[in-house]
Image (spheres, grey):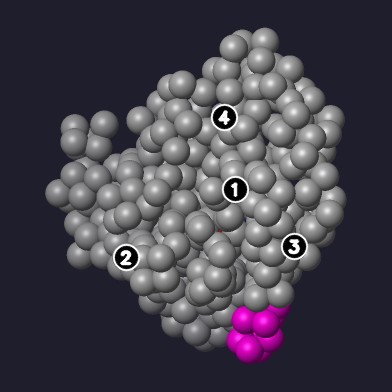
């Protein structure tokens, strides 16, 4: 689709708005930084795709050395498989007959690994896989301190591993955890210590599982907010760092990450009701401010900004003729994860010119 797009070669200000834009030089540099850091530490990179939801970006990551993708949902995994990506970790529990059937159907066309953290789920997956004559790879989700899903490290994980080993249709291949409780820690030494402690629980449990005879090949953790510490922990085989490739104000301000911003929204000034007020055609349905507010670029000093569903309203500190109605303003996104899935396309731009238009094929894939 991107080859045939009439906008290719045009300057980005030619875009109709609102438009979601990725700067390719920044995207590629962010991808390279994560890929190189993983390579240096001998750890695989299996980026989470929940943020970009776009096969072209997944292929760009694979081209840079990623070993596969991480998904949150079966329907996301289906989109990745349809784009010829085989190695997929679904870092989540998949429960219920309809979804489990779709998961089993992916075994063959792709090579999925799915999370489990209960006997109930193990039983459902084992019954479905054996009924269809397939072997499904599973990884136990371990609670390393985030306190969301996951089995406790140590004995409880070993007990679930032993149950999986008895079940037909399943093969235990690994363990995974997500040390998200460390993301917001402002003190880097404390963040490093917290990641080390959390991931240490995962790697120690992996060792114990191997000693008990389980073939643990995958020990997966990590995310942008714990970069680069998650990569440096001995015993980790792969990390799931996803959103770093885009970066955003949430990661910058709350996770203290220095990745340059690759993702912006272009909006048009549609009204100037007063010399200090600017109204634009992009609101919460285009660029949410839930985790952090989008940041307008190139404006005089801003006193306040509010988003309604379809409008942004900016109050300048001082009266100004600029920008004028019809001018286009770019915003750094607040949080890419709640922004990208609202858009049908990402426009890929290099040095101000449109190079490709990518479909966000997994938008809406929440099952
Ligand atoms: C299972 C899992 N892994 C990793 C991550 C980190 O993703 P990202 O690097 O995009 O912040 C998350 C984020 O919420 C997650 O839920």
Graded by Cα atoms within 10 Å as few (under 14), some (14 to 19) or many (20 or more), the crowding at tag 4 reads: some
| Residue highlighted by disc 3 | 144
In terms of secondary structure, where does tag 3 sit? loop
The dot on residue 32 is 2
Which of the two marks, 2 or 1, is nearer to us in this view?
Answer: 1
Q: Which residues are magenta?
A: 184-194
Give the alpha-carbon distance from disc 2 to disc 4, as whole Å. Answer: 28 Å
Q: Earlier in the sequence, mark 4 or mark 1?
A: 4
Graded by Cα atoms within 10 Å as few (under 14), some (14 to 19) or many (20 or more), the crowding at tag 3 reads: many
In terms of secondary structure, where does tag 1 sit? loop
| Residue highlighted by disc 1 | 216
Which of the two marks, 4 or 1, is nearer to us in this view?
Answer: 1
Magenta span has 188? Answer: yes
Say above or below: 242 vs 99. Answer: below
Residue drawn where x is 71% and y is 75% of the image: 197
Assign the N terminus to one quadrant of the image: top left
Q: Position of residue 108 (x, y in %)?
A: 46, 21
Whether residue 142 is visible, yes or no, is yes
Residue drawn where x is 30% and y is 62% of the image: 28
Residue drawn where x is 50% and y is 28% of the image: 78
Q: Earlier in the sequence, mark 2 or mark 1?
A: 2
Badge count = 4
Q: Main secondary structure of the magenta part?
A: helix
Give the alpha-carbon distance from disc 2 to disc 3, as whole Å. Answer: 28 Å
Along the line of sight, the residue nearer the viewer: 322 or 344: 344
Magenta span has 164? Answer: no
| Residue highlighted by disc 4 | 75
Residue drawn where x is 77% and y is 39% of the image: 162
């Amino acid at each position: 689709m991107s080859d045939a797009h009439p906008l290719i070669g045009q300057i980005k200000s030619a875009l109709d708005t609102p438009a979601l834009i990725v700067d390719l030089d920044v995207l590629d540099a962010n991808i390279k930084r994560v890929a190189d850091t993983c390579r240096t530490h001998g750890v695989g990179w299996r980026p989470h795709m929940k943020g970009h939801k776009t096969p072209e970006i997944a292929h760009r990551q694979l081209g840079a050395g990623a070993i596969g993708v991480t998904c949150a949902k079966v329907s996301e995994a289906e989109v990745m498989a349809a784009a010829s990506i085989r190695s997929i970790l679904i870092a989540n529990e998949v429960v219920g007959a309809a979804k489990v059937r779709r998961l089993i159907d992916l075994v063959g066309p792709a090579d999925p690994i799915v999370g489990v953290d209960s006997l109930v789920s193990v039983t459902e997956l084992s019954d479905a896989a054996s009924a269809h004559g397939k072997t499904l790879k599973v990884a136990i989700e371990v609670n390393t301190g985030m306190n969301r899903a996951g089995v406790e490290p140590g004995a409880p994980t070993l007990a679930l591993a032993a149950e999986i080993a008895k079940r037909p249709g399943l093969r235990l291949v690994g363990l995974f955890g997500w040390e998200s409780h460390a993301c917001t820690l402002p003190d880097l030494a404390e963040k490093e210590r917290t990641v080390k402690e959390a991931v240490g629980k995962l790697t120690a449990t992996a060792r114990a599982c191997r000693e008990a005879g389980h073939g643990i090949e995958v020990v997966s953790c990590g995310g942008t907010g714990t970069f680069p510490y998650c990569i440096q922990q001995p015993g980790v085989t792969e990390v799931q760092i996803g959103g770093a490739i885009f970066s955003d104000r949430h990661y910058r301000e709350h996770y203290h990450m220095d990745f340059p911003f690759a993702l912006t929204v272009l909006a048009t000034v549609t009204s100037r009701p007063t010399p200090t007020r600017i109204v634009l055609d992009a609101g919460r349905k285009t660029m949410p401010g839930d985790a952090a507010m989008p940041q307008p670029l190139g404006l005089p000093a801003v006193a306040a900004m509010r988003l309604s569903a379809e409008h942004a309203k900016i109050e300048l500190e001082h009266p100004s003729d600029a920008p004028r109605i019809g001018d286009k303003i770019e915003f750094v996104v607040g949080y890419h994860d709640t922004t990208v899935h609202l858009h049908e396309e990402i426009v890929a731009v290099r040095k101000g010119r449109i190079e490709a238009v990518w479909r966000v094929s997994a938008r809406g894939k929440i099952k």
